[in-house]
Amino acid sequence: MVRFRLNRPSDRQIQAADALGPARLRQAISDKQEFVWGFTDALHRVFPDQPYAGPLGNTWTIDAARNEYESCQLVVIPATVDMKMAEVFVGNFVRMADASAGKATGGKRPVTIGRQNTTVRVVRMARTGGMDWPDPLPLAHPIDVARGQVRAWWLTVHVPQNARPGLYTSKVTITSQSTGGREGKVTSVPLKLRVRDFSIPTVSRFQTVAPVQPEMTAWKISPVSSSGGTVTPRRVLDRKGNLQLDFAEFDKKVEARLAAGQTSFSIGIPYTGAGVFVPWAFDWRVPVEGQDATRRIYVNPVAREDLDARKPENQQSRKWFEQYITQFYNHLESKNWTKHWWIYAADEPHQAEWKEPLTRYFAIIRKCAPKLRIMMTREPTDYFGPHVDIACIMMNHLRSGTHETARKLGQELWCYSCGHLNNPGLTLRESPVDIRTWFWLQEKWQIRRVMLWHSSVYGHTFLKPGADGRGDGQVFYFRRRADEQDEVIPSIRAEMLRDGVEDRQYFHLLKQAARRAGDRIPTSLRDRAAALSKVPDSIARTQYEMSGDVQRLLSRRVQIADAIEALLSGTIESD
């Protein structure tokens, strides 16, 4: 009997063909490539077990202002071997004009942006609903990449504030223990960086606010607290039972944060939380002068069953609250810090039962602290009287005319995402380009900033993250370490939040530069700047009508940067 051995592909060959497509796999084999690579933007999801149709073997240029963070992805797909202990490194960025001049003249060393300004992370998966989604971005370490698997590395450059504008080039090296032949040769691929001739501030006026740890603020998120405050003075009862505040440590902390660029601070004493009364906001334990033990006091100034505080215990609670707010406010005024502070006074008070208690609560705050801004998470309204300064609306309640309502009421408009009903939301399933486009919609509808209800809730795992298992309330993860501090791991969603804030800063710079240039610029440039300062419907019409077109958004951003450079001519500072 004659047996024929059929030339059937192995499982790994099938995986490689699925990942690349038969034609691209044949080309890689023909070119004797052990693996293929390609750059893509940060707005496309790259799944390890799904076909990769993005570019391969391409050049890439990161485009960023000074003091800006900008990212891209390097995708690697083993075609003929398993890659053992694969690693990716990014070298120094060298200014190309200086490098060329140096070679020609033997002159000074070229200007460089050191590799310490580049962070390499590996894109990992978080699981929800039985599916893995690209999201966690832990710092890269040697990893195995099986043949046919699609692996993405996240490359982020932070351009120094003093970087010289121009085009820079770097080498990205890809290595593993099973590629490069006997000599173990590395694969080097070029990566370019265009540094713009303008800078953006470390802390943006459009900064996202959320409960965060200090190491999270690099993602353009300022700390906020819905209970207690971002920085809180020491509270103590004196011998007469009066509440006194000690600002010694408070001042040191605030001064340090101001020096670091933080310009938003909150006092968290919400009367309602998620639409229900929150008694714990007013339930304090404080030391007592001359005693070793602390005393529990209740400082709610508006008891629902005794709105006028006729009962002695309610009179005492109101007195303590007014002492606290009055001293806090007077100290802020004496330091000229009031402009940086606001009070988180109520959360989602949609029920009619809160009208009278909150109207009185806001009035007491205004009496004690006339210029302290009062924030409430609800649509702009005067339902609770004239004292609300900031209306923070849930995304799915937002409409195209909401900002006009806020303007008529003299209220600053913020927005926030909570749960899965928002569009866009901040769950794992949300498209990165939609999250970033969300900020363009804020620009269109004159929304000042985003607030996150939480940034790392319940989050020590990549499995079922967040409060609902879908990532809600968790844009940072943690990796627990036995004898060291937990590693804070950002997500793709956190990266999009930062990129969105930086996009809004571009819009601000464009408008600012055009306004300052006035009639000193050609009419054509002035008209172009005016057109670019508006967000077209083709990118975002409403929160339910966003294009999702990555190239359209990125192309528009480049046009805005070009216009800023044309307007500034390197002579203006950002604010």
Image (cartoon, rainbow, N blue to C red):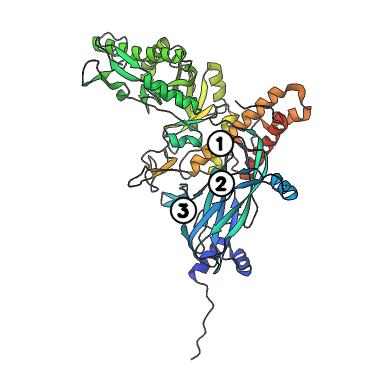
Q: Gap between marks 2 and 1, in whole Å?
A: 25 Å
Of residues 537 and 329, the one drawn nearer to the viewer in this rendering: 329
Check disc 1 and report its element: helix, strand or loop: helix
Q: Earlier in the sequence, mark 3 or mark 1?
A: 3
Q: Quadrant of residue 75?
A: bottom right
Label disc, if present, on residue 141 of the rendered structure: 3
Q: Gap between marks 2 and 3, in whole Å?
A: 16 Å
Check disc 3 and report its element: helix, strand or loop: loop
Residue carrying label 1: 500
Q: Residue 459's x, y, as percent?
A: 38, 42
Examine the rendered structure and indicate whether residue 108 appears above or below residue 9: above
Q: Earlier in the sequence, mark 2 or mark 1?
A: 2
> Badge 1, how many Cα within 10 Å: few under 14, some, many 20+?
many
Examine the rendered structure and indicate whether residue 100 appears above or below residue 268: below
> Badge 2, how many Cα within 10 Å: few under 14, some, many 20+?
some
Is residue 449 found left or right of 297 in the rendered image?
right
Of residues 374 and 305, the one drawn nearer to the viewer in this rendering: 374
Q: Quadrant of residue 77?
A: bottom right
In front: mark 3 or mark 1?
A: 3
Of residues 369 and 469, the one drawn nearer to the viewer in this rendering: 369
Label disc, if present, on residue 359 of the rendered structure: none
Q: Residue at x 35, y 12 (%)?
A: 322
Q: Residue 162's x, y, as percent?
A: 61, 35
Amino acid carrying label 2: it is Arg
Q: Residue 27's x, y, as percent?
A: 63, 66
Amino acid carrying label 1: it is Gly
Q: Residue at x 41, y 23 (%)?
A: 252
Label disc, if present, on residue 115 of the rendered structure: 2
In front: mark 2 or mark 1?
A: 2
